[in-house]
Amino acid sequence: MTAHTGKARLVLIGTGGTIAGRGGSAVNTSAYDCSVLGIDEILTGLPAAAEIADIRTEQLFQIGSENFGTAHLLQLGKRVAALLQRDDVDGVVITHGTDTLDETAYFLHLTLKSAKPVVVVGAMRPPSALSSDGPLNLYHAIVVAASRDAHGKGTLVVANDEIHTARDVVKTNTFKQEAFRSPYGPLGYIVEGVPRFYRLAARRHTVQTEWSIAEIHDLPEVGIVYAHGGMTDHGVRAMLDTGVRAIVYAATGNGNVAASVVAALRDARSRAVHVVRASRTGGGVVIRNAAQPDDRYDWLAADDHVPHKARILTMLALTGACDADALQRAFLTY
């Protein structure tokens, strides 16, 4: 980086996604080519960002986030961790596709050992579209990452004028700009270019967690089975044959498990595969020993984690202690 100007020194990492997309016309808000623009080109279209921070760019990936796998999570996490250790880096902003943005952000929230701001940002409309949300989302992400008020709050997600904790935020719509929601509301807002925080995330993150990206070199396989009416046990048994270490069962209601599936899930546990009861509803708490006798079956309850975030937490928990008690504590701690 150049000589320090007194402004925050940020690294902007590009990974692709809609925020880097291009449509055939200005009215193509849902049909477009994803991951076309490089991060330098995106930043060039946002000259106001230079007034906020000294920014260096890196293009780490150029993919739609539906293609993000565990190898991408590890590579991104390790690169961000290395940058945060530098004295000439005050924060990191990551542009990301929205499909799995909430998963990547939660992974970083649990594994980065730094109080410096990390902000993950995407867009629901490509830059070529009328009323694209990408430029303002990115500007707001830079503003938040440059703010001292963002320190110590874990990985943040900025979208639609809102600041969310990575722990809570979930994508809830396929095309609307207000797609990202948190069940307990955002941590704050960006008002006229200034971040305003109103609450904090209560669960442990970053420097308080038991996991460090520096010590994680691979992640165990964890799968998700989605419940539906007329459920059979075929999906569970097929997944067992893939060698997963755990199955997150995206159950109906409060983690209810159809009678037709109980035997297969109990068989999974007898084969040392953990079973996590979550809910497909997208909100609320799955209560241990309520819908199912978790103590008797040695199953886990996901608390308020949605299934795909329960998967992230289970993968991380399985890198350490693998007994059910330790895994259950993780769901009640993070």
Image (cartoon, helix red, strand yellow):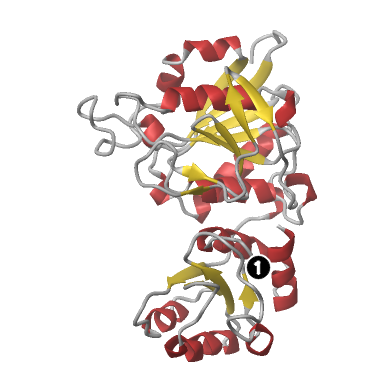
| Left/right of residue 222 with respect to residue 89 in the rendered view | left
Residue at image location 30% in from the left, 24% down from the top: 130
| Left/right of residue 318 with respect to residue 71 in the rendered view | right
Residue at image location 38% in from the left, 43% down from the top: 64
Q: Residue furthest right?
A: 208
The amino acid marked with disc number 1 is Leu
From the image, which quarter does the N terminus lie in? top right
Residue at image location 42% in from the left, 89% down from the top: 260
Residue 192: x %, y % from top left: 57, 17
Q: According to the image, label 1 marks what residue? A: 318
- Which quadrant would residue 330 be assigned to in this image? bottom right
* Residue 321 visible here: no
Q: Residue furthest left?
A: 24
Residue at image location 58% in from the left, 81% down from the top: 291
Q: Nearer the viewer, residue 97 or 188?
A: 188
Q: Is residue 95 above or below residue 253?
A: above
Instruction: Assess disc 1: are there few (<14), some (14-19) or many (≥20) residues with their C-alpha within 10 Å of its C-alpha.
Output: some
Q: Nearer the viewer, residue 50 or 58?
A: 50
- Which quadrant would residue 232 be assigned to in this image? bottom left
